[in-house]
Image (cartoon, grey):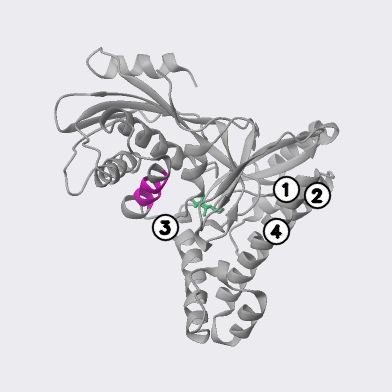
Amino acid sequence: MEIDFVRSRFIKHFDGQTGNIYAAPGRINLIGEHTDYNGGFVFPGAIDKGIMCEIRPNGSNTVMAYAIDLKDRVEFKIDDPQGPRASWARYIYGIIQEMKKLGVDVKGFNIAFAGDVPLGAGMSSSAAMESCFAYALNDLFGDNKVSKWDMVLAGQATEHNYCGVNCGIMDQFASIFGKEGKLMRLDCRSREFEYYPFEPKGYRLVLIDSVVKHELASSAYNDRRKSCENVVETLRKKYTDRDIETLRDIDWDMLNSVKADISEEDMKRATYVLGEKDRVLAVCDALNKGDYGTVGQKMYETHDGLSKDYEVSCEELDFLVDMARKNGVTGSRIMGGGFGGCTINLVKEELYDKFINDATSAYKEKFGKQPKVYDIVISDGARKIC
Ligand code: GAF
């Protein structure tokens, strides 16, 4: 994204002065979907698409915010108990409140921001916004005293408390901790993580965006999380001597032992989560050996689980994964929360052009929409630009 673009709009929409510029990225996730809020493992990386903001304290207690891409302007008092209604401004308001809880003395400011993470494509434009704003407020008003992990949690709390999405920590983690050329294997319970160099020789990682966006994605996401919690609740009652915090703490025997006590739907959700827990570990092992065949096979298995048991896929995404299978692509699956968005594909260099041509033209013919293709560049996390 162009710094000059954001700067020119900031100057035009405010008082002609410049401020500081910050950026934070969206993310991909190789494997480990819907495992973060179940205390499991995820395998994300930051990408070269994100959010950039220019911001300058204005000496008042009012925030004047301009969303460049939407050409929308909002003004609100920092201590307004309700905050703004515009969904994009909720992220700014939420981050202010959460950073204040962490001791940052946020004062009024002018802010303009723009982004190149496609919205609703499963690359987490919302976490990019939260991380960008948290990073900026920490720098401008907090002497950078808030730790990276606390900024991750402030982003997550913003989703929970101001945007109605009970998400896990994967997206904000990737956006804050991302490193060029590295994926990260994160244990969402202990928060321990390691950087994994990801340069699969002879392969490319590519996203195909179905351009499908589902209106009710947030409530359906929250329903999935609730199902997992229902199962944990039932298991806790049965295994009173065990410490069961999330689905991470149970095994297949335990799950099967409560099959009669939980709904069929909740059983399917938990079946997916337990399978995914095993798959992430298998992928780590395979990556260590350079065995991309196994990595790809696990990606397909994840897709099947997300489609049939977790039920977060849709006809369009299943079609794109089928096209990958037909073209001999090594691995393919829906990426992110689901209900629309992208597939992530691990494809051999020599198959790349034919796969992209076949998949996009067949998709257009069947659904009458042009899918978008994004080659992935694994990049750095949130940062100050100038
Ligand atoms: C969304 C959420 F924000 C993440 O926390 C994660 O649960 C993901 O869906 C699914 O893996 O991106």
Q: Position of residue 133 (x, y in %)?
A: 35, 34
Given the image, on which type of amino acid does mark 2 rest? Arg
Q: Residues within 10 Å of mark 4 (few under 14, many from 20)?
A: many
- Residue 279: which disc? 4
Label 1 SS: strand
For the residues bearing labels 1 and 2, Cβ distance under 8 angstroms: yes
Q: Secondary structure at mark 4?
A: helix
The relative height of residue 371 versus residue 277 in the rendered view (above or below) is above
The residue lying toward the viewer, choosing from 266 and 353, is 266
**Would you say the residues marked 2 and 3 are in contact, meaning their CB atoms lie under 8 Å apart?**
no
Distance between mark 4 and mark 2 Cα atoms: 19 Å
The residue beneath circle 1 is: 332
Residue 325: mark: 2
Q: In the rendered image of this protein, does residue 226 appear above or below residue 348? A: below
> Relative to the observer, which residue lies in front, 103 or 358?
103
Q: Residue 246 at x, y = what percent? A: 51, 68
The part of the chain drawn in magenta is 152-159
Q: Which quadrant of the figure contains the C terminus?
A: top left
Answer yes or no: is residue 305 visible. Answer: no
